[in-house]
Image (cartoon, rainbow, N blue to C red):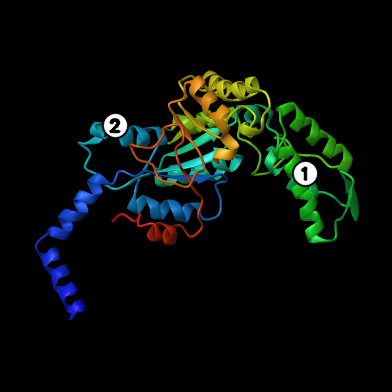
Amino acid sequence: MYERMRIVIAAIFFYTGLTYLALRIKERSDRRLIILNYHNADGSLEAHIRYLQRHYRIMHLEKALEEVFTPEASSAKRDRRRPLVLTFDDGYIDNYAEGFRLAQRYQVPITIFLIPGYVESGCYFWWLAASKLVSQIQSEQVTFDGHVYQMSQPHERQALIDSIDGRARHATSIAEREQFLSEVQLSLQVSLPCRGAGINDSNLPMTWDQIREMEATGLVSYGAHTVNHPILAYLSDPDEVLYEVQDSRRLLEEKLGHPVRMFAYPVGKMQHIGEQGIEAVKSAGFTWAVTTLETLNTRESNPLLLGRMPEIRNLIGWLWQQSLLDY
């Protein structure tokens, strides 16, 4: 009996147009912005873009945030689909080789957060260093930090990777981190690649020429991601925190020739940002800053602590589960 009543009520709502009206009201009141966070442009990215383009308004980050925080400015727009942003952290060269190709093919905008120190040096990103170095070891065993690791044992190799990465990750200054990585390379007799002739590695950073080429199309916009990608909360010197944030903006503005208002915190959880990180972003004058806190964004969100959803392989299933599918 209850089921039959439910069906009758649903039919009344549908045929009188009340269902449509309710959906439109929900649509206007639901101003949640989805920001997706990618790193490399590979794997399922093309499938994601094809799907998302059908169901969402894919926008540049800055334009999407302006719309969310000042909705009256976009009231005349007819496309009521939920806004969504594709962001990429770090500036891997495959963002140019593959991400840019897909942006052009499907005419979708993307936003990339750059690390000017790495763009300038062309060297391997520090958070990938441990895996890269250990993958090159040919010896049966190595001694590191007073411990002997058997390279034939997968769990021992992983333990060595974790040990190296942990030391680099918790460095209290850029100098300490770089000195440690130099010592590791000497100790293990292996080296990290840098951008150059004959080097083909998608985990190297893009060049300034590639960055400018992408921006010239109007499809790619940029934000800052510190100068050297330290974990801000772990730095012991407040002046270094301020330098990493402020100068990332200054260097990008000098290279790109226009204001840069967006920032992404390295790693991006609150324990990695710290109060000093937030204060540095305020001092640098950024309008928006994104984290990796897994939340959606509304007018009530803190513009300097915006949430982003991680790259999700089963993206469609996740969106369905979160009731974020728009039709």
Percent from the top left, x then y, of residue 163? 78, 46
The residue indicated by pointer 2 is 70
193 up-or-down from 235: above or below: below
Instruction: Determine crowd level at label 1: few under 14, some 14-19, many 20+ residues with C-alpha closer than 10 A.
Output: many
Mark 2 is on which residue type?
Thr
Regarding mark 2 in the picture, which secondary structure is present there? Answer: loop
Answer with the quarter of the image where residue 174 lies: top right
Please name the residue shown 73% across and 43% down the image.
166
Residue name at image x 41 percent, y 53 percent: 50
In the rendering, at what x and y percent does residue 120 appear?
A: 65, 26
Identify the residue at image location x=62%, y=33%: 233
Q: Nearer the viewer, residue 166 or 57?
A: 166
Quadrant housing residue 1: bottom left
Identify the residue position indicated by label 1 in the image.
164
Q: Quadrant of the C terminus?
A: bottom left
Identify which residue, 171 or 133, lies in the foreground: 171
